[in-house]
Structures are given as C-alpha cells and as structure tokens.
Amino acid sequence: MFQKYSISRGRGVNRKLSEEDAVIKASEKILPSVVMVSTVQLVEDYFMSEHPVEGVGSGLIVDPKGYILTSRHVVAGAREIQIWLQDGKSLKGKVVGEDPTIDSAVIKVDGKGLPAAELGDSDKLKIGQTAIAVGVPFRLIGGATVTKGVISAVSRTIQSDKGSLENLVQTDAAINPGNSGGPLIDINGKVIAINTAIIPFAQGIGFATPINAAKRVLDRVLKYGTYKRPWLGLVGMDINESVANYYRLSVSRGILAARVFRGSPAGEAGIAPGDVIVAIDNTELKSMSGLVKYLENKSVGDEISLTVVRGRQKGTTTATLAETPAEL
C-alpha cells in the first residue's frame, strides 16, 4: 500500500506527489465498476399522448453477479433500462429493489464476473477528508469522469419535489447532471456514498446517500431477491421539555404522533394523533430517527409492540408492519 500524505523533510514536494498518486490509484480502482444508466420513460403531453423520453445517470457494480447500485430517481418510472459498461458493452437492466426515502435503487443485469467495487463504512466519515466523485456527466463520450473535493458535512437534510432526504453526506466535489447514482469514494478507492443531488446555481454543494444506508437495501435484495421497506405509517415529532410543556403532555420523552395515515399499521393498532409513543418492543424511544433506525432492521409482516401514552393513561398495542406504499 502507498503511504498517504507522507512528507519528506528537507525536500518539501513528496506530500503533493503522494496525494496526487493516491487520487490516481483510487480513481483507477473504482473506474471499472462505474456504469452509465440509460433509461426510457413514456411521458404524456398536453393532449394525453405518450412520447418516449430518454434519461441518463450513473451506477455502480456492487456484486460480480450483476447487481448495480444507483439513485432511485435515475430509474423511477423507466420502461427500459440499459447499462453501459466501461468496455462499451451494453446490458439490459431491471430494478429489483428501491427505497425512495433514501433515493436508492438496485438494478440487476445478466452478467458474471463483473468488476465489483469495494464498499467502505460511511459511519466513520470525517469532515474535511478527501472525497472523489465519479460518474458519467452530460453523456460525455469517453467513459466516466472524476472530480475531487472534501466531505463538507454529514447528516444533512434537504427538501426535494418528492419529499425530504435525510442523513445525507455533503461534499464540494463537483456532482454534475448525469453523475447521480455514481459513487463518492475515499482516498483508498472505497465507496462511501452514492451521489444523489445538487443545489442548482450553487457552487460546491452536492449531496450523496451514505453507503451504509444503501447497503441495507442491497443486502435485502441479495438475500431475498427483492426489497420491501417496512412501514408503520405515522409522522412524529421528537419530544423534549419545551414541547411537553407547550402541548401539556404528561411525559417529556418519546415521539408525539402528529399524523397517522389512514389504514396504516399504526392506525390499525389504534394510535391516533396526539398520542405519545415512549417505547418500541420494550426499548425506550427518544426520537423519530431512533424509530426509523429500529424499523430498518425489521421486515414487512413483523409484529412490533408499542408503548403509548394518551393523556395520563399508558398502555401497549401491537402493530404489524406493512410495505411502504409506492406513492410515499
């Protein structure tokens, strides 16, 4: 292995050369795994006539048997998906798992021995560390391109036309149109996130889905052949002392149910707006993020126990998790 950022005292040039060499090696390591994702959608015009519209994005080979990670918005609504490898070979793709809440999707192609990328650990990211974005911007001829920057922030939340995306990685490495679905890698060539969004007209503000979040979708697909995100069906608010005092709640810790979807597992379990969920499966619940993280390790059809406070009464109910509706 090369030494990163080594300095030779008295010469003063090895640090720059070492970093440059590291970026080159990291890029060479990941490039064979980066693909172009070409899609065709049918879009209705003003006169209700359908017309084919082509789209393009990037993807990442994550399993030699033909599994590819990309951003969900790259393939959403696609009637046809074509995957272009770095050697120019084209393969027909099919979406086998997706999670719109983290903008991730898994595509399957018929292939063997494909060059799979090495996945890193996004929980260990540090602000300021080197980040390299790889993708196929603007359908440029000649393969994938590389841009370099740093991790600007972690745990970012942004609003999109489809809702909010949470726990994103922010980077100043240029993410251009077409880069969505491509990898964000560290200095060792390990994938730390999947590029997902940019802020139009902003300089150096791009976002990516942490690879650990995308792994959860991928792992389910590899194990079961598909992915179905478990759904409880409520929107909640974290409770603290000030929230408890404002709403005159009898508890100061838990989740205040602000909205319960009709026909959802939460609704069928008897939970109503204004209820406070204080525990799940006898484990204290402190925040919505804690609830989301807990549900990520559950499957559709699993039963969970919820401890609920309504006014000054406390009780327990059981909910059976359902599949997240497509419209959500």
Image: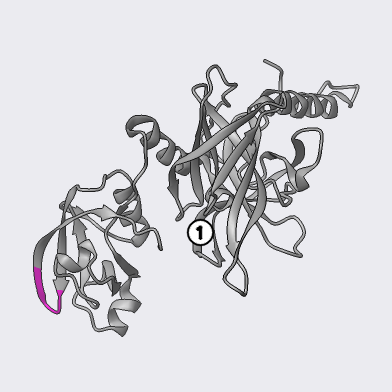
Percent across and percent down for residue 136 are 72, 41
Viewed as shown, does residue 36 lie left or right of 61? right
Percent across and percent down for residue 165 are 51, 59
Which residue is labeled 1 in the image? 165
Specify the amino acid type for callout 1: Leu
Residue at coordinates 20% horizontally, 48% vertically from top-left? 301
Q: Does the segment drawn in magenta span residue 312?
A: yes
Percent across and percent down for residue 8 are 83, 21
Main SS category, magenta section: strand
Asked which colour scheme the image uses, the reply is: one colour
Residue at coordinates 58% horizontally, 27% vertically from top-left? 117
Residue at coordinates 57% horizontally, 34% vertically from top-left? 92
Residue 232 vs 247, above or below: the answer is: above
Asked where in the image residue 205 lies, by quadrant, the reply is bottom right
Which secondary structure lies at badge 1? strand
Q: Can residue 75 be seen in this view?
A: yes
The residue stretch that appears in magenta: 310-314
Percent across and percent down for residue 27 are 72, 28
Residue at coordinates 15% horizontally, 75% vertically from top-left? 310
Assign the N terminus to one quadrant of the image: top right
- Nearer to us in this view, 205 or 303: 303
Q: Can residue 153 be seen in this view?
A: no
Residue 250 vs 188, above or below: the answer is: below
Q: Does the segment drawn in magenta span residue 114?
A: no
- Nearer to us in this view, 49 or 149: 49
- Nearer to us in this view, 223 or 246: 223
Viewed as shown, does residue 173 lie left or right of 295? right
Residue 112 vs 92, above or below: the answer is: above
Assign the C terminus to one quadrant of the image: bottom left
